Image (spheres, helix red, strand yellow):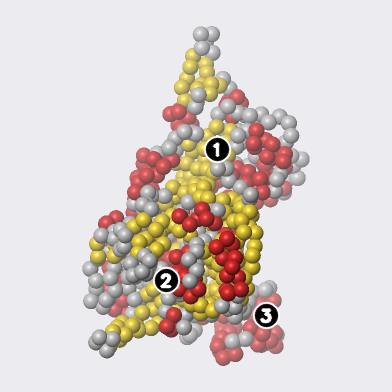
Amino acid sequence: MNRIKLLELHLEIDSVIIGERIKGGTFRPCQDTIPSSTIEGALKRYFGIKAPAVGFFEDTYEFDEFTYSVRDKMLNISKLPITTLYLKPKPPHKKIKAKVYILYSRGAGLKDELKNAKFQLGALKSKGFGESEIVNVEEIESEIKQGILKVKVFEVEAMEFRIEPISPVYGYLFKPDRFSIEGVYKRALFPGSLVKAPDVLLKEVSFYDE
Amino acid sequence: MGKIYRVFEKNTRVIREPDGSILIEYNGEKVKTIKEAGGGRRTTGDTNIDKGKWQARLVKCWIKFPHSFVRLHDINLLRKREELINYIISHYKDEIIFATSDFITLFLPPNQDLKGILKPLLDWGFYIEVEETLADLGILNSILDRKTLQARESNDQPRLNVLNNRSTKVYRKYLVPEIPDALQPPICNICQQRKAVKRSPESKEESVRDWVCEKCQEIREMGEPFREYATVWEEEGVKVCWFKFSLDQKKLENWLQNAFGEYVDSFNFRQADVLKDEFRPLALQVDFSKDYKKMLKEFWKELAGIEDIKKPIAEYDELGVFKYSPELTKMVIDRFMNLFDEYFPDCASDNSSPVSLSLSIANIKYPIREHWRFFEENCKNFLNIRYLKVLSEKYTKDELEDIKKVINLETSSSFLHKLIQLENTLQSEIHIAVEIFNNRKKYPEIYEIFSKGIKSSKFLNLYRLLKGERQ
């Protein structure tokens, strides 16, 4: 069978920071993709869903900066201000739109629970970033095609989505341990990889020899 | 081309038959004539496939990196890339048809190991996006990959019939450094591919840890790109404008193919389509790339001696930085436009232009990696400008010329100034449009560019940048 059944979550987000790992300096960049590590963490925390998930933002966002100061509670002083990039809706959009996919077999029973549910995604939640609403949940069938991947997904979870690397671009995503205290960087497929995958996860369909 | 001849010379064997005839063997295939080796030149048609016996690969390599420039020293990576490319060229002079700072085209026999050739780049953490075409010599050219993929997408059977029967293959590959399945923290802040084993010294002002792997540390220690940036300029707290030239090879291929098509059409040849189909742009790409490099050298020659404009990496001509001022911004844009006219007078100069210039203006504290992120964005136009938190615009060359004529007029100046004030207070494009229309008789030159479809924000922003209008 050349199709896969998925649960497609339509998200609307006010503003969000999914930080990059770079820690140097007082300026924090942010990503414009939703790594599977981030969305899986959020689904687990807010809904108790332990399932592979992938996602991406649609072209409804732009970057802006937010400056804040971290407080040292012990010394009761503020540290140097830190500026972080964040995503905000790109006019005329009022919200950032994103799509998240869960395997239908793992999320079929959650459809009603997830519809209109609210949760937070990414960093600086205490400052109000990452407030997200699942405005729609659809069961979809996506055809498996060759193309260029547009999501970041753990390599070990890619096969569950029937993502088969033909020529992969690798990077690392952080996988917390079961206590969410420590963790390890796991190899992941990054956007740009040439794959066979559900076409909803492709930036473009391609016709290369394999 | 001499290079291709020499690649064959290395990979062929001359066999003298008992009857005195001569055969040449390449990749296990013996031929007596050029036609037998290369086959026909057509890539479409139902009959007469005319398959050749010899195949070769044309390999396009985009050299990329996952690194993020955390500190100024980290742009030494660009120097390292230049060094490594030059090293590879010196070892594979014949196989490498041409190279720029981030792109290499190779001509290779079917079995030669590409990864082996590019290993020095992989060892330093670069990765290579490869588009490789394997085809009969009679049809192998630098745009056959595109033609083949288009034929597959549109299911163009006459073309696919020939291409498939001639065993034409197009591959996309990534050559990537070997990385393990899992990595224990900390991970390198710069390349994000290796375990960080060193923490570089923290400056007094910074309390944030900076984890760096050995390779990236070595690159960091290659030297300070230019000292004044982090000392004098930073102390002065100036605004800086980083700028980068780019040559987009895919746009170059497109433009060459379209320009050749238009040229052929202008003669009304009966066999125009055949000529267009057999077009081989590789030699033109080589010449264009050489001219591009010469243009950059000329650019820097003309700006030599200007204290506030710097080339941070001496060996790398695409990247520059200056203390932002309207005068220097104007100078850089004017030099680029003049040189572009001189070197590429008939070349596309809009969003299909192979050559572009991007400028990114921000306070000196703004991280270089964010300037670089802007430079690496797709969808470039001829000129791309971002002034952090102030403006972001893209211009075609025609738009620039039209706007510059207007903003250089003394008579327009007061009205442009008024429009900027209106824009600042009302934030309304419609009000600006009405104001321009109402003043069309008094300021016809502004109405003229506006009625050409150039948005008011484009000429007002350029006025701000080049005339130093206060934000």
Closer mark to the observer between disc 3 and disc 1: 1
What chain does mark 1 sit on?
Answer: B
Q: Are marks 3 and 1 in contact (CB under 8 Å)?
A: no
Residue under label 3, please give it: B447
Residue B85 position (above or below residue B374): above
Q: CA distance from mark 3 to mark 1?
A: 54 Å
**Does residue A140 show up?**
yes
Q: CA distance from mark 1 to mark 2?
A: 42 Å
x 31%, y 60%: residue: B184
Residue B156 position (above or below residue B126): above
Residue B286 image offset from top left, x and y in percent: 50, 46
Q: Amino acid at mark 3?
A: Tyr
Residue A19 lies in quadrant? bottom left
Residue A45 lies in quadrant? bottom left
Residue under label 1, please give it: B134
Q: Amino acid at mark 2?
A: Gly
x 61%, y 56%: residue: A4
Q: CA distance from mark 3 to mark 2?
A: 45 Å
Residue under label 2, please give it: A19
Q: Residues within 10 Å of mark 2 (few under 14, many from 20)?
A: some
